[in-house]
Image: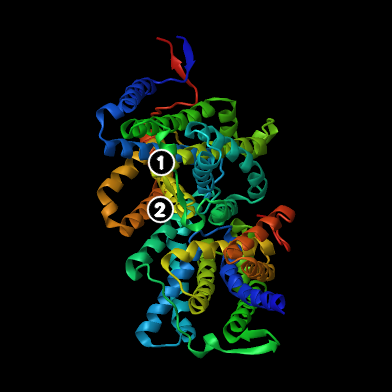
Amino acid sequence: MTWVNIVIQGILVGGLYALFAAGLSLIFGVMRLVNIAHGDLIIALAYLAWSIVHATGLHPLVSLVLVVPLAMAFGYALQYGILNRTLGKDILPPLLVTFGLSVIIQNGLLEIFTADPRKLNAGALETGSFPLLPGVDIGYLPLLQLIVAIAVIAGLQYLFYNTALGRAFRATSDDSEIALLMGLDKRKVYAWAMALCLGVVAIAGVFLGIRANFDPAVGPGRLIFGFESVIIGGLGNLWGTLIGGIILGVAQGVGAQINPGMQVLAGHLVFLLVLAVRPRGLFPRMTG
Amino acid sequence: MSFQITRATSASRIAGMIALVLIAVLIAAPFWGSTATLRLLGEMMIYLALASLWNLLAGYTGLVSVGQQAYVGLGIYIMVAATIYLGIHPYFAIPLAGLVAVLVSLPVSKLVFRLQGAYFAIGTWVVAEVFRLIAAQLGSVGLGGGSGTSIPTAVMQGLASNKYWREATIYWIVLALGIGAVALVYGLLRSRIGLALTAIRDSEVASTSLGINIERIKLAVYVAVAGMTAMVGTIIALQKIRVSPDAAFSVNDWTAFVIFIVVIGGIGTIEGPIIGTIVYFLLREFLSDLGSLYLMLLGALAIIIMLVAPKGIWGYIAKRWNISLFPTGYRVEEKQ
């Protein structure tokens, strides 16, 4: 029963990794941008939620009502003001600018919040669970996490294929110049994509903060987990990203069972294995 | 009126002479500088070497790696393991590390080359994390595991009998690596490979049609840079003596700062890493007391440069006054 439990808990953690990955997948799909600061933004928004919870006494999940719109506004401004200027044929500018942003966010958080670990307190939700099988308890929080991840991905999928904004995303992704002729300003389309990405990042940040301690230095690790989920699942496939996150979560759970030091390493090794066997991921929709 | 084709310019001839004088002054540093000066110069040479190598990789070959700390750390750990377990003299551990890194980088390249552009960058980072986590698991074989270990005093004494000569010896090795890295990049860019790299940079399609094997050139550069980077790592081990996985495979120390140096100095130029190293150490001397604010400042500077002058300080100077201290192309000149 131990192994069944490990796999089930791994699947539930996978929901969180899918939340890390969904935003990455979205902006890569729309504008071929890989944001090195993605993980640091997750942590920054966890800190924002922490500050709001601290100041108002709101429940962390309720604080999302404030955190998500603020994050989206910031994402729009970041893309419109800075990142749009880096997009072009050369891959260096966006990479190096977001790399600089990552260092600025990490050290800015260190300056404001110090290196002390913080946590979001969600009360009874954190500890509550129900038995699924003998020896297998499902925590309310991990379950909610997975359900939210599925809902977010379903929402993004709907938005992509059933709304005007989604049509704009797809058109600009396919050919931004023709899209421009049709009256789509790609700078605004990209800004909306980044706004949406940061909305998802805010949700990821709050769940991360409820689940475990965080400090300013843990951002790059979250970027790597999200990135691995995207590649394992296959580029451009949002549902694949969810499966990628789940595979990563299970791999880490199995690794931790073998040896606590193996947890993260096992996830990386599974990622490298997928890269060796299926370079385009398990369910690819597009080429890198 | 007749013309000749030449590489050298009067600026490059003067720069060459100044460089020779400067190298002579640097070689003599143990005789005129204090221990503190020697250490600072040694550290500058480490960063000059790492920056030149990363510049060759990212600026000229388009392989933007964020995982070069994998090879720095590999070099550091090989120096420790070779001197402690194999009883090898530190001198021999340096080329050994280069060789091992070349052998390791071949299978690694098979994996990371499957990723394009920015995904390649994060892929290399994952590989470096794998190396770090494996190093943290090495406790059972006596390499200290997560908390690290030290190079024994006896090994350090094998370098030279007293502290003065030891410091001087380490400095000369690192000086040779720093100047060697710049010379390697310069030499490579003037060779057929350099010509191929320039052609690839300008147009991959056109260069392929001219018979350039892009993948092979990229692989050759990646592997050579990995080997050199690991050799730099061995000297870092000798400088620091104490090693730990987190410090040996630090993304900040061996990649972030290196990237800032290259971007600020001028990516895709030979002079860039030299200028960048000088600027970086000047900033550090005056501003490092600011702690994390200083790092934010560096990050902001790199972003501004990337947005305003993507070719960095040297790119701006070279364009403004049309000069090149290390010319790699040819120019037509009127015969005197």
Which quadrant of the view contains residue A73?
A: bottom left
SS label for mark 1: helix
Residue B153's mark? 1
Residue at 39% in and 27% down:
B325
Percent position of residue A155, x then y: 62, 78
Which quadrant of the view contains residue A50?
A: bottom left
Percent position of residue A286, x then y: 69, 59
Considering depth in this image, is A65 or A249 the residue closer to the camera? A249
Which quadrant of the view contains residue A106?
A: bottom left
For the residues marked 1 and 2, what is the alpha-carbon distance in whole angstroms?
A: 44 Å
- Callouts 1 and 2 in the same chain: yes
Residue at 63% in and 63% down:
A267
SS label for mark 2: helix
Q: Label 1 sits on what residue type?
A: Thr
Residue B33's mark? none
List the residue tagged with mark 2.
B303
Tell me the quadrant of the picture where the C terminus of chain A can be found: bottom right
Considering depth in this image, is A175 or A99 the residue closer to the camera? A99
Dot 2 falls on which chain? Answer: B
Considering depth in this image, is B132 or B83 the residue closer to the camera? B83
**In the image as oriented, which residue stretches furthest toward the front?**
B154
Dot 1 falls on which chain? Answer: B
The answer to whether residue A18 of the structure is visible from this angle is yes
